Image (cartoon, helix red, strand yellow):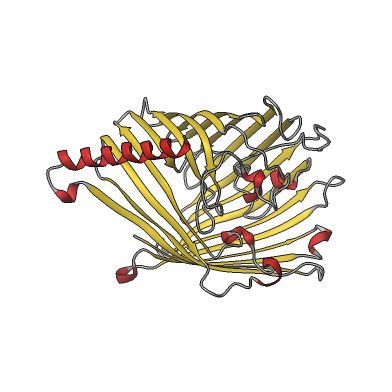
Amino acid sequence: MRKNLCAQGWLAICAVLASSLAFADMPGDVFKFSGNLRLYSFTRDYTNSQLTDLHSTSLGGKFKVETAAEEGWGAGLAGYFAQDIGLNNHDQNNKYINPLLMGTNYGIYVPGEAYAQYKSPTYLVRLGNQIIDNPWINPSDGFMIPNLFRGGIATYRPTQEMQIEFDRITQFKNRTSPGFDSNTLFNLPYSNPHFTANNNGAAAIGMNYKGDNLSAKTWGYRFYDIAQMGYVEDGYQFHLSGIAPFVNFQYMCETGDGAQLLGAVDSRAYGAKFGLTLPAGAVYLAYNKVPTQLAAGISNGNLLSPYTQIYNTDPLYTTVMNYGLVSARAAGSAWQMGTNLKLLDGKLDASASLSRYMTEPYVANVNALMLDFAYHLSGKLKGMTIRYRPGYENGLSTWGSHYLDNRIMLQYSF
């Protein structure tokens, strides 16, 4: 049955592509191609002698073909791959490999996107395997292959500033899995919590608004048989003489859903972010609070984010690339000060943040320093980016006094 449905889906997509080809005036108007190639090295060094330092290197990328028409019927196909190029140590049951990059595989090759769509200036309907991007369900594209989702989306844009969206996910493919399954990130062996049973996916409905001064997001989620979540975020950009301060606020509430496969849920999160927009970027101060609310024996009310949790890609202002209040699994608060800059005529993106997570007595307090530099080449090397992301954290005794992340990526986008 499942193979038949897959076959029918591929036939439908091929039919849409053929239809687009038949009605195009010129072959050059039919398709557009895009993608990237990535060479990525990821190391993590611990000071705890009981832990093994980790290292992974991978070559990978994405190749995508889609119909070029801006309106009407269309379709898209994209393949993703990540390949061990002989620099990873698979000895002793892969104990030296950092599984976040591409798992412990020698290679991952997946037809990640395969969808048909109808698009107008006001509406978009897309069905199939695709990227979905909203606050709590997103690509988490920090390594080789992004999160991918099987299902459908429908968007309506009543004005240039506002978009309303409905998403229904039936299956999910995380960064390192070989295909789509009816599970979540909790299925990963290093996830906390860890849960391997299937569920019926997720549904989300939301509104995004972006005006000259005011911005707003309002989203509701149902993670079937796990949790229901509401999320609101508002921001205001002041335009004053010589300076441009901004302020943002966020609120999240979550309760259980259906069978509550991971236990009862009753969680809240609050956040605020204040800063100044500068000619070259921005500086800011952010704060988040997850109040104590015992549920399922967890101090943070058993806050669950099935598609971001272990990847630290949730929208809380103080979440960094490898830690945050969601993945800490504890009540508490966090602050962060940082800057995001564009330098050298926009060729260099540079950001830095210093964060502190205060979660005692449930989990030890953690300090984090994160840096991110991305240099974009020009001329004949346009499309090439060199990115370096070091991260330093201390606090948890299981790490030793601290641990150090080094992430280096060379990417060519076309």
Instruction: Decide if residue 238 is on the left or right side of residue 257.
Output: left
The correct choice, above or below, for 78 with respect to 401 in the image is above
Nearer to us in this view, 336 or 177: 177
Instruction: Decide if residue 380 is on the left or right side of residue 242.
Output: left
* Residue 128 appearing in the image: yes
* Residue 210 appearing in the image: no
Instruction: Decide if residue 21 is on the left or right side of residue 338.
Output: left
Could you say where residue 4 lies in the image, as x and y percent from the top left?
41, 36
Q: How many marks?
A: 0
Quadrant of the rendered image containing residue 249: top right
The extreme bottom residue here reads 87
Quadrant of the rendered image containing residue 155: top left
Residue at (73% x, 44% y) in the render: 193
Residue at (46% x, 31% y) in the render: 209
Quadrant of the rendered image containing residue 369: bottom right
Residue at (62% x, 50% y) in the render: 311
Q: Quadrant of the C terminus?
A: bottom left
Nearer to us in this view, 318 or 275: 318
The correct choice, above or below, for 165 with respect to 320 in the image is above
Nearer to us in this view, 265 or 408: 265
Could you say where residue 126 lies in the image, as x and y percent from the top left?
38, 34
The extreme right residue here reads 361
Nearer to us in this view, 240 or 306: 306
Could you say where residue 80 lies in the image, as x and y percent from the top left?
44, 55
Could you say where residue 354 lies in the image, as x and y percent from the top left?
67, 57
The correct choice, above or below, for 199 with respect to 386 in the image is above
The extreme left residue here reads 25
